Amino acid sequence: MATPDFLQDFAKDYAAQAKGAYSVPINTSTFTGGTDAAGNRISGDVVTGANPFVAGEDALQTQAIQEAQAGLGSYKPYLTAAQQAQTDASTTLGGLGAMQTAAQGSTGANAYQPFMSPYQQQVIDTTLSEFDRSRLAGQQNIRDAAVVSGNFGGGREGAMMGQYNADTLGDRAALQAQMLASGFTNAQNAAQQNFMNQGQLMQNQMGIANAQAGLGQAQLGLSNFERSGLGADVGALGQLGSLRQGLAQANLTANQQAQQTAAYEPYGRLSQYGQGLTGLSGGVASQQYAPEQSISPMSQAVGTALGVGGLYGKIFGFPGDK
């Protein structure tokens, strides 16, 4: 179909513009590109620098990773301390057996025997010897009185001497019994006091064991607190860093879309120009050029922040928070 005369100049102009536009390749490196192993941006076969459309790691993300790496195994000293405290508690409880045996030795009918004074018999013998010597003087006094009264060797002297000796034996036996009873009472009291002391020692030992076990539990609590605190800090830093990275990525994506739109704008304009000429010449217009629909930079930023931020929480968060 021939082009009407009044459109000849427009058709030539369109052809010239189309030739100029389509004869030059689109410089896609202005809005596309990958990176090589060194992180440099690659466009075709030419390395032109780092990819300008990919947001780098945010400083808060870097800090989160560094703190997470530095905190790996930080709970171990608390765990070691907790294990040592539990071991100490077990050792302390193990000593209760000997104490219980010692306490049992302080009860029963013969419990007083270990507490009897080894010098008691010597004291008794010495005391009785002194008693005997003191009674000899009394016997001599009776004899002297009998001589003076003229009854020496008589029945009166014998009666007095017999009564005196009987009293001596009774007093001697009472004195010996008193000393034995006193020693027994002292030994029995010492055994009873030892039993009470052993019981108190056992209670103290139990208290120490409970305190050591409590210390172990406290150390475990500190371990869990340290891990949860580290996880919370790292997770918060990671999520905030992801948000800032997402916002930066949104800005880069908007720049990329703007450059891409600018690169394809001549083709869209020529397409509309050609569609208009075709319609004026009475022809059937082809499908109109439509630019590629782009993802909203802000929605992409939000998606990036939620996705990467949640990943930080799962990786570095406390196990109970997963």
Image: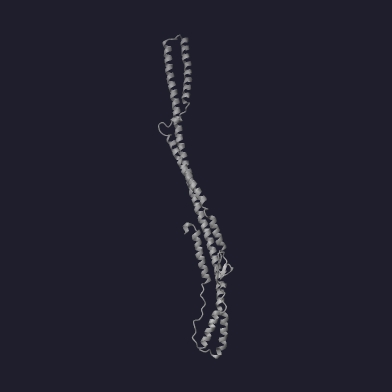
Residue depicted at x 53% and y 59%: 234
Residue located at (47% from left, 14% from top) = 140
Which residue is the extreme one toward the bottom?
5
| Residue 232 picture location, percent across and down | 51, 58
- Asked if residue 206 can be seen in this view, the reply is no
The number of callouts visible is 0
In the image, residue 100 sits, relative to residue 49, either above or below, namely above
Residue found at x 43% / y 14%: 161
Q: Position of residue 50 (x, y in %)?
A: 58, 67
Residue 172, above or below 288: above
Q: Residue 31 in the image: state x and y as whole percent.
A: 56, 72
Q: Can residue 79 be seen in this view?
A: yes
Pick whichever, 284 or 139, lies toward us. 284
Camera-nearest residue between 78 and 212: 78
Instruction: Identify whether 271 is placed above or below 183.
Output: below
Q: Tell me: residue 309, above or below residue 258.
A: above
Q: Which residue lies furthest to the top in this view?
A: 150
Single out the residue that lies furthest toward the front.
Answer: 45
Residue found 51% across the figure and 69% down from its top: 300
